[in-house]
Image (cartoon, rainbow, N blue to C red):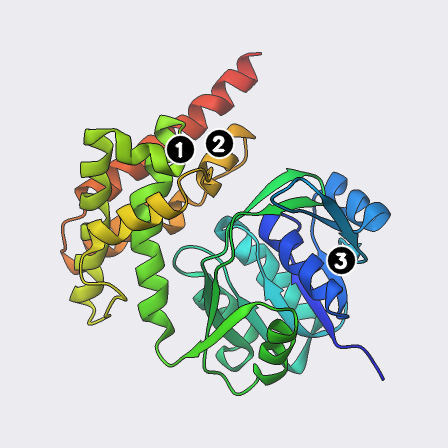
């Protein structure tokens, strides 16, 4: 019997995690990326997962730089890479194919739909975290949920994810989940990045804990202004609960800063500030955090140039 095939777009932590688990379930995995070291490691060693005890296991994948014909694709790149990815997928996604984006932040689904057509794009949200230990090596930060919108073309993808033991749910209102996760990301990610601390340490600093709540509430107010319901009643408490549950996690934004990579601040706090201005909803802390993270990124670039 022919194995199902999925294109995983990305070679980072979550992309490696999904590739490994799907490969373990017997799915034929191709990974699309542009990171030379990552592509080489994935082709040589496979997608490697490290468990909680430090044990490493490899799973066969094929990693490519140029997109090939694909019916199903899962996008797991950073938000600033979405435009380029959409252009690549336009060349290789079959007419009846579907792309599932599980990315952070706002605007990813819209960018993909602009290039591929709305009928070929589905959106989802994941609460599973992962850390990249090295090229092609990831460690899962705890089992989470994969929530995807109800979409007529997602049947096979949903079945494959379930077969790979992902905790999957189909939801009628994906915007609610996207904005709920956005509020949490806005509360935790920029502060951990600016303070250079793991998630849980935010709860130990009175000022940081207060700002977490205010950042989350700004995002929630913006959702309310658009008649988007959230999955919690108290945004600040929800952010604290996630920080507590993921206390030892290093946020993806802090990971990006530490390795000198671009961050997703524009799709998180930056997007909140921009939409706030459009709708005349005050989001001063999100705007301030976006500017500070950008400044920290640019300071690193200047320092690098000077050296």
In the rendered image, residue 81, in percent from the top left (x then y), is placed at: 55, 51
Assess whether mark 2 and mark 1 are in contact (beta carbons under 8 angstroms): yes
Q: Is residue 94 above or below residue 103?
A: below
**Which label was assigned to residue 257?**
2
Upstream in the sequence, badge 1 or badge 2?
1
Q: Secondary structure at mark 1?
A: helix
How many residues crowd around disc 2 within 10 Å: few (fewer than 14), some, or many (20 or more)? some
How many residues crowd around disc 1 within 10 Å: few (fewer than 14), some, or many (20 or more)? many
Upstream in the sequence, badge 3 or badge 1?
3
- Label 2, label 3: how far apart the Cα atoms are: 27 Å
Assess whether mark 3 and mark 2 are in contact (beta carbons under 8 angstroms): no
- Label 3, label 1: how far apart the Cα atoms are: 32 Å
Residue under label 3, please give it: 66
Q: Judge left or right: residue 84 versus residue 26.
A: left
Visible residue check, residue 211:
yes
Q: Is residue 66 above or below residue 303?
A: below
């Amino acid at each position: 019997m022919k194995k199902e095939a999925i294109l995983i777009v990305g070679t980072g932590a979550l992309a490696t995690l999904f590739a490994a688990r799907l490969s373990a379930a017997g799915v034929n995995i191709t990974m699309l990326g542009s990171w030379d070291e990552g592509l080489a490691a994935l082709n040589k060693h496979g997608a490697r997962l490290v468990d909680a005890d430090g044990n490493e296991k490899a799973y066969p994948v094929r990693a490519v730089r140029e997109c090939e014909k694909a019916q199903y694709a899962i996008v797991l790149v950073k938000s600033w890479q979405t435009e380029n990815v959409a252009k690549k997928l336009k060349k290789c996604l079959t007419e009846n194919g579907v792309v599932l984006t599980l990315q952070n932040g706002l605007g990813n689904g819209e960018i993909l739909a602009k290039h591929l057509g709305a009928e070929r794009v589905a959106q989802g949200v994941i609460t599973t975290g992962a850390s990249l230990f090295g090229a092609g090596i990831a460690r899962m930060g705890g089992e989470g949920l994969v929530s995807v919108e109800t979409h007529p073309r997602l049947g096979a993808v949903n079945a494959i994810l379930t077969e790979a033991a992902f905790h999957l749910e189909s939801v009628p209102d994906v915007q609610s989940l996207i904005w709920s996760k956005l509020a949490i990301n806005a509360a935790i990610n920029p502060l951990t990045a600016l303070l250079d601390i793991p998630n849980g340490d935010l709860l130990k600093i009175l000022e940081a804990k207060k700002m977490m709540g205010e950042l989350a509430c700004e995002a929630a107010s913006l959702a309310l202004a658009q008649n988007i319901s959230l999955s919690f009643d108290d945004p600040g408490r929800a952010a604290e609960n996630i920080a507590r549950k993921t206390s030892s996690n290093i946020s993806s934004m802090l990971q990006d800063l530490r390795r000198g990579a671009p961050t997703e601040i524009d799709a998180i706090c930056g997007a909140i500030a921009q939409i706030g201005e459009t709708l005349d909803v005050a989001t001063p802390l999100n705007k301030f955090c976006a500017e500070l993270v950008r400044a920290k990124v640019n300071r690193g670039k200047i320092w690098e140039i000077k050296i």
